[in-house]
């Protein structure tokens, strides 16, 4: 069991470390996506450099690299929850600190989504997405939307008395996402009301 956990963790880190968004930009767009937006080698800058189709493909690839070894850990090898979550965290760490880019990876949001989607308890992913949606509706900065979702998901796990492994995993993910988004968190979150704006726009066009 220990050998399987170690091997899957190493493989998850290695796959997570693959900067698919950057490679997609180079091979398909013939561009270095780090020259766009915030200079991050992630899918958001693929959208900026190449539009919706290529950006969407980058999101799918970045999410997909978080899932395979997590699924293998719990469905094929039947590893305990702690080991499964460790494998998932290694995939996220590989993305955040990829050796392919001198340990300067992306913000790791998409790969985190892939890991949460792959873990046995799917409600964690659903809660995170729901809170992300709520955050998008009422917060004006992407970094704070991510923080709202991660912190809210952690609160959910604590409130329903989930296992310590899940709580520690989510707490670690929250800290990692905060670190990766630290440059955007210097400014406090602004409160907006996107639904009200959309309604005004609809009535204005009517």
Image (cartoon, rainbow, N blue to C red):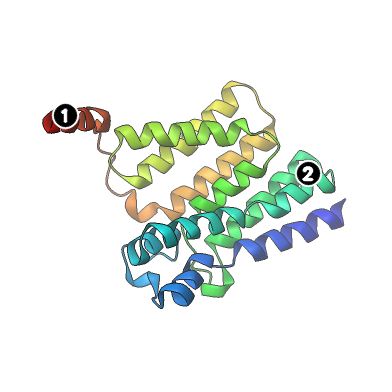
Farthest front residue in view = 206
Q: Residue at x 45, y 76 (%)?
A: 26
Numbered disc 1: secondary structure = helix
Q: How many marks?
A: 2
Say if mark 2 contacts mark 1, CB within 8 Å.
no
In the image shown, does 136 or 53 lie closer to the viewer? 53
The residue carrying pointer 2 sits among few (fewer than 14), some (14 to 19) or many (20 or more) residues within 10 Å by Cα, namely: some
Numbered disc 2: secondary structure = helix
Residue 105 rendering spot, x and y as whole percentages: 50, 65
Compute the Cα span from label 2 to label 1.
48 Å
State the mark number for residue 148: none
Mark 2 or 1: in front is 1
Farthest left residue in view = 204
Above or below for 90 versus 147: below
- Quadrant containing the C terminus in the rendered view: top left
Residue 71 rendering spot, x and y as whole percentages: 73, 47
Residue 181 rendering spot, x and y as whole percentages: 40, 52
Instruction: Identify the residue under disc 1.
Output: 200
Above or below for 66 versus 129: below
In the image shown, does 165 or 56 lie closer to the viewer? 56
Residue 125 rendering spot, x and y as whole percentages: 57, 37
Q: Quadrant of residue 199?
A: top left
In the image shown, does 169 or 77 lie closer to the viewer? 77
Above or below for 188 versus 59: above
Instruction: Identify the residue under disc 2.
Output: 74
Q: Residue at x 66, y 66 (%)?
A: 14
Compared across the picture, whether 166 is left or right of 187 comes to right
Q: Residue at x 61, y 30 (%)?
A: 123
The residue carrying pointer 1 sits among few (fewer than 14), some (14 to 19) or many (20 or more) residues within 10 Å by Cα, namely: few
Compare marks 2 and 1 and give the one earlier in the sequence. Answer: 2
């Amino acid at each position: 069991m220990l050998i399987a956990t170690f091997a899957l963790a190493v493989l998850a880190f290695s796959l997570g470390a693959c900067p698919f968004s950057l490679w997609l930009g180079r091979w398909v767009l013939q561009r270095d996506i780090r020259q766009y937006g915030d200079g991050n080698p992630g899918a958001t800058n693929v959208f900026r450099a190449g539009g919706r189709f290529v950006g969407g493909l980058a999101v799918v690839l970045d999410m997909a690299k978080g899932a395979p070894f997590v699924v293998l850990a719990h469905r094929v090898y039947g590893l305990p929850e702690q080991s499964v979550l460790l494998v998932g965290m290694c995939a996220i760490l590989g993305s955040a600190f990829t050796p392919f880019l001198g340990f300067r990876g992306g913000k790791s949001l998409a790969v985190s989504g892939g890991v949460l989607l792959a873990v046995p308890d799917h409600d964690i992913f659903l809660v995170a997405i729901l809170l992300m949606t709520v955050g998008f509706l009422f917060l004006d900065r992407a970094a704070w939307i991510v923080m709202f979702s991660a912190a809210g998901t952690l609160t959910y796990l604590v409130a329903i008395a989930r296992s310590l492994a899940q709580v520690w995993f989510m707490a670690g993910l929250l800290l990692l996402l905060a670190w990766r988004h630290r440059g955007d968190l210097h400014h406090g979150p602004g409160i907006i009301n996107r639904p009200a704006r959309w309604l005004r726009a609809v009535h204005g066009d009517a």
